[in-house]
Each structure stands twice: as C-alpha cells, then as structure tokens.
Image (cartoon, rainbow, N blue to C red):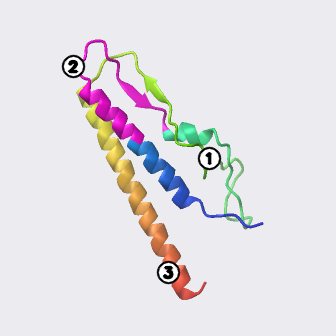
Amino acid sequence: MTTGVYLFDLASQHARYLAVRQATIAGNVANANTAGYKARDVVPFAQVLAKTGLDMQMTAGRHIEGQGARIPVRTDSGGGWETLETATGVSLEQEMLKGGEVSRQSSLDNAVVKSFHRMLMSAVRSGS
C-alpha cells in the first residue's frame, strides 16, 4: 500500500490557518476602541487536526516506539476555521503577543518546508 507525503499539504493548511488568525488579530486591533466589541480568536490548529483522528503509519517496527503515537498528518477541512468570541474586550498587548506567535509559527513552517524540499531534491538527484 503506498501513501502520499502530506507535509506540503499540512504546511499549506497551516499557512491558511495562520492567515485567518492574523486577519482576526488585525480585526481585534482595528476595533480596540469600539464600544462593546469583544476580542476574537481562531480555534487552535491542533484542535482542528485532532478532529481528523489520523494515526502515523509504520513502515518498519522500530520506526515508532510505543503505542498510541498519534500525530495527525492531514486534514480535509475546507479551511473554514471556527472563530471564537471571548468574554472580554481587546487587550492590545495580548493581540501583539498573538501576532508574534503567528509570525514565529510562519517562520518555522517555512523552515520545515525548505528543509523537506532540500531533502526531496537531494534524494531525486542521488537517484534513491
């Protein structure tokens, strides 16, 4: 049984999630002075992936030690990320922290995708 490599698909979905989260944060900042406005955020990406229930597959018995090693690797959601409304108003400090978190996650995603791409290209060039 052959399976695809879904790292690029996962990175693409995470990038879309980060874009939605960044837009939500920007909306919070833009409405910081709006009376009655409640800050919003997006459901954490890990929760969205946990709903897929996909398990890692072993190609050899020693590749994954222990039982219950669940790492979701692909989701078929259309990117309709759920937005949550909080019970409090907008804290600009919190929004800036969230923005920094989005930036760090995006940088990490880019680094992982570049490394994976280099690894694939190396394997293709060596004929493996």
Please tell me which residue lies in front, 28 or 44: 28
Query: Which structural element holds mark 2?
Result: loop
Could you tell which of marks 3 and 2 lies nearer the N-terminus?
A: 2
Q: Which mark, by number, is residue 76?
A: 1
Work out which quarter of the rendered image holds the C terminus and state it.
bottom right
Could you tell which of marks 1 and 2 lies nearer the N-terminus?
A: 2
The magenta span reads 20-44
Query: Which structural element holds mark 3?
Result: helix
Work out which quarter of the rendered image holds the N terminus and state it.
bottom right
Q: Residue at x 72, y 50 (%)?
A: 67
Looking at the rendered structure, the kind of residue marked 1 is: Asp
Query: On screen, 62 above or below 91?
Result: below
Q: Are marks 3 and 2 in contact (CB under 8 Å)?
A: no
Find the distance from the CA under tag 1 to the CA under tag 3: 29 Å
Q: Position of residue 84 (x, y in %)?
A: 46, 25
Could you tell which of marks 1 and 3 lies nearer the N-terminus?
A: 1
Q: Which mark, by number, is residue 44?
A: none
Query: Which structural element holds mark 1?
Result: loop
How many other residues sit within 10 Å of disc 2, few (<14), some (14-19) or many (≥20)?
Answer: few
Residue tagged 2: 33
Residue tagged 3: 122
Q: Is residue 40 magenta?
A: yes
Q: Residue furthest left?
A: 33
Q: Position of residue 43 (x, y in %)?
A: 49, 33
Query: On screen, 50 above or below 66?
Result: above
Looking at the rendered structure, the kind of residue marked 3 is: Ser
Q: Is residue 28 magenta?
A: yes
Q: Residue at x 29, y 36 (%)?
A: 97
How many other residues sit within 10 Å of disc 1, few (<14), some (14-19) or many (≥20)?
Answer: few
State how many labels appear. 3
Indicate left or right for 52 with 109 as reference. Answer: right
Q: Residue furthest bottom?
A: 126
